[in-house]
């Protein structure tokens, strides 16, 4: 039986789930942030983002279970670009959800927001994520030497991007 993966906009009742992930050091390592977040700070971010047209936030579900968070931010309707982010709850990592979620967000960007390009940053040693992004159609566009300090060491970041035309060619949409 195949599980249905879908996205719904973040609601206030999702904040506890998001807070759990934001406090997980293993997850935050790949978000280039420290695992420090208070409910008050997250609530303020949520409230502020409800008035911000440059961000779209989603909770990813497998059937009816919350499995992750994903977003498009720095949305520019003038330049038709956005930056992509994703975090999968630790209990749901390694189950093949990420690729499907990335596809869903990219399709949303291209076919609902009419964007032309989606970009992201990824640390060089996150080989699983890089592989998934490349399967979806993202390409490495640049290197950022010693961009991120993680666990006491500097790491290179990759700037990756995908164009709508390339996505359509490779995914037959």
Image (spheres, helix red, strand yellow):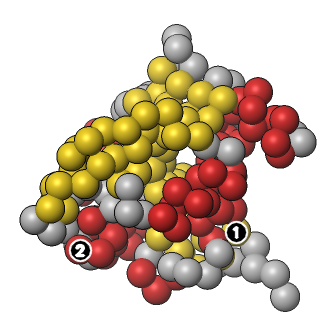
The residue under the point 10% across, 65% down is 152
* Coordinates of residue 37 in the picture (x, y in percent): 17, 63
Residue 104 horizontal side relative to residue 16, left or right? right
Q: Secondary structure at mark 1?
A: strand
Q: Residue 14 sits in which quadrant? A: bottom left
The residue under the point 59% across, 53% down is 133
* Contact between labelled residues 1 and 2, with CB atoms less than 8 Å apart: no
Give the quadrant of the N terminus. bottom right
Q: Residue 29 sits in which quadrant? A: bottom left
Judging depth in this view, the residue of 105 and 169 nearest the camera is 169
Q: Secondary structure at mark 2?
A: helix
Judging depth in this view, the residue of 100 and 128 nearest the camera is 128
The residue under the point 53% across, 25% down is 81
Residue 46 in view of the camera: no
Residue 83, label in figure: none
Q: Earlier in the sequence, mark 2 or mark 1?
A: 1
Q: In the image, is residue 51 above or below residue 125?
A: above
Q: Which residue is mark 1?
A: 5
Judging depth in this view, the residue of 172 and 155 nearest the camera is 155
Could you tell me how many numbered marks the image carries?
A: 2
Q: In the image, is residue 63 above or below residue 71?
A: below
Give the quadrant of the C terminus. top right
Q: Which residue is most to the right?
A: 172
Spatial separation of the CA atoms under disc 2 and disc 1:
25 Å
Judged by depth in the image, the label closer to the viewer, 2 or 1, is: 2
Crowd rating for badge 2 (residues with CA inside 10 Å; few <14, some 14–19, many 20+): some
* Coordinates of residue 64 in the picture (x, y in percent): 64, 78
Residue 25, label in figure: 2
* Coordinates of residue 99 in the picture (x, y in percent): 65, 62
């Amino acid at each position: 039986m195949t599980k249905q993966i879908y996205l719904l906009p973040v609601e206030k009742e999702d904040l506890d789930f998001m807070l759990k992930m934001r406090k997980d050091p293993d997850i935050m390592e790949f978000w280039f942030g420290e695992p420090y977040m208070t409910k008050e700070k997250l609530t303020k971010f949520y409230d502020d983002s409800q008035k911000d047209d440059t961000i779209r936030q989603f909770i990813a579900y497998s059937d009816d279970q919350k499995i992750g968070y994903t977003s498009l931010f720095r949305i520019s309707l003038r330049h038709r670009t956005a930056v992509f982010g994703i975090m999968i709850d630790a209990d749901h990592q390694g189950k093949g959800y990420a690729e499907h979620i990335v596809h869903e967000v990219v399709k949303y960007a291209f076919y609902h927001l009419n964007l032309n390009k989606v970009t992201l940053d990824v640390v060089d040693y996150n080989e699983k994520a890089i592989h998934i992004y490349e399967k979806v159609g993202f390409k490495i566009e640049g290197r950022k030497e010693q961009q991120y300090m993680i666990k006491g060491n500097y790491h290179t970041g990759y700037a990756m991007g995908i164009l709508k035309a390339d996505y359509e060619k490779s995914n037959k949409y």
